[in-house]
Image: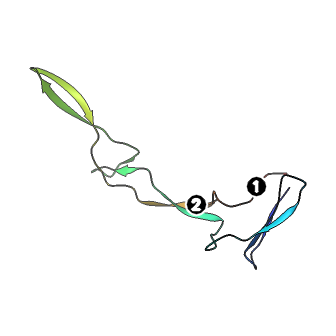
Amino acid sequence: MGASGCKARGLWLFTSGVGGAQALVRPRGRVVPPFVFTRRGSMFYDEDGDLAHEFYEETIVTKNGQKRAKLRRPLFPWQGTVKLDPPRIHVDFPVILYEV
């Protein structure tokens, strides 16, 4: 059931679920490393340098002589690319991991 890769030839060796037959598969296109070292950040910086997923700003709206408070989402700069420590395994890596 386990799997191993052959880096010298760029082939992946794995067993199929039916009959336990082994197959060699050559990845199409360029060879992609099995690890991911960076990801796209999902947070934003405000003008004070605080970091959060979302910010809201309270604004006062006057309608028919009545004042109402509304929350509005201002535009702030994005966090950017985040380095992962430790690196993660790529989602398209064709190996099933399990602990014995």
Q: Position of residue 92 (x, y in %)?
A: 65, 59
Q: Position of residue 15 (x, y in %)?
A: 84, 59
> Relative to the observer, which residue lies in front, 70 or 21?
21
> Relative to the observer, which residue lies in front, 67 or 18?
18
**Crowd band around label 2 with a 10 angstrom C-alpha radius: few (<14), some (14–19), many (20+):** few
Numbered disc 2: secondary structure:
strand
Considering only vertical position in the picture, is 26 above or below 16?
below
> Relative to the observer, which residue lies in front, 74 or 7?
7
Residue type for callout 2: Asp
Residue at 41%, 50% in the rendered image? 43
Residue at 85%, 51% in the rendered image? 100
> Relative to the observer, which residue lies in front, 21 or 31?
21
Q: Position of residue 65 (x, y in %)?
A: 9, 20
Q: CA distance from mark 2 to mark 1?
A: 22 Å
In the displayed structure image, the side of residue 33 where residue 73 appears, left or right: left
Q: Which residue is mark 2?
A: 85
Determine whether label 2 and label 1 are within 8 Å by CB.
no
Q: Farthest residue toward the right?
A: 19
Q: Quadrant of the N terminus?
A: bottom right
Residue type for callout 1: Ile
| Mark closer to the observer (2, 1) | 1
Asked which quadrant contains residue 91, the reply is bottom right
**Crowd band around label 1 with a 10 angstrom C-alpha radius: few (<14), some (14–19), many (20+):** few
Q: Which residue is mark 1?
A: 96
In the displayed structure image, the side of residue 95 where residue 28 appears, left or right: left
